[in-house]
Image (cartoon, rainbow, N blue to C red):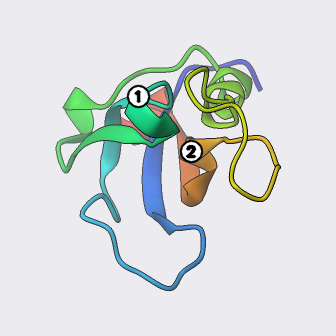
Amino acid sequence: MNSPCIVKVIGAASGAIRTPHDGRYVVAWDPHTKFGTLSLTSTNDITQAHHFPSVGAAMAEWSTISSIQLRRPDGLPNKPLTGLTIATERVDAAA
């Protein structure tokens, strides 16, 4: 589907810990930070959520490999955003 969407953080992908972003909407995220870790800004206010042009665009960004730390210690690609379980919502459905 090519309609605009927003992203909501469900929680840590491992499910083992709670994060301060659980249940909140993504305002901004960046996988290209020092040490290749995740930088995330989230909000409870749906009107402040970042609008992605499509679910595909949101998912492509979510699976981005860090340009700072390309590999994790186990040798796999470092995709810091995939440490989160997320859900997308269509903008017209969320409004």
26 lies above or below 33:
below
56 lies above or below 43:
above
Q: Nearer the viewer, mark 2 or mark 1?
A: 1
Q: Which mark is residue 80?
A: 2
Q: Nearer the viewer, residue 61 or 4?
A: 61
Which mark sits nearer the N-terminus, 2 or 1? 1
Quick one: quadrant of the N terminus? Answer: top right
Helix or strand or loop: what does disc 2 sit on? helix
> Which residue is located at x 69 percent, y 49 percent?
72
45 lies above or below 23:
above
Q: Position of residue 66 (x, y in %)?
A: 61, 29
On the picture, is 74 further left or further right than 18? right
Q: Which mark is residue 93?
A: none
Q: Nearer the viewer, residue 7 or 93?
A: 7
Mark 1 is surrounded, within 10 Å at the Cα level, by few (under 14), some (14 to 19) or many (20 or more) other residues, namely: some
> Which residue is located at x 43 percent, y 21 percent?
51
Q: Position of residue 44 (x, y in %)?
A: 19, 50
> Which residue is located at x 55 percent, y 24 percent?
68
| Residue position marked by numbered label 1 in the rendering | 33
Quick one: quadrant of the C terminus? Answer: top left
Please name the amino acid that badge 1 sits on. Thr
53 lies above or below 20:
above
Q: Position of residue 41 (x, y in %)?
A: 26, 38
Q: Position of residue 71 (x, y in %)?
A: 73, 40
Residue at the far top in the pictured view = 53
Please name the amino acid that badge 2 sits on. Pro
Helix or strand or loop: what does disc 1 sit on? loop
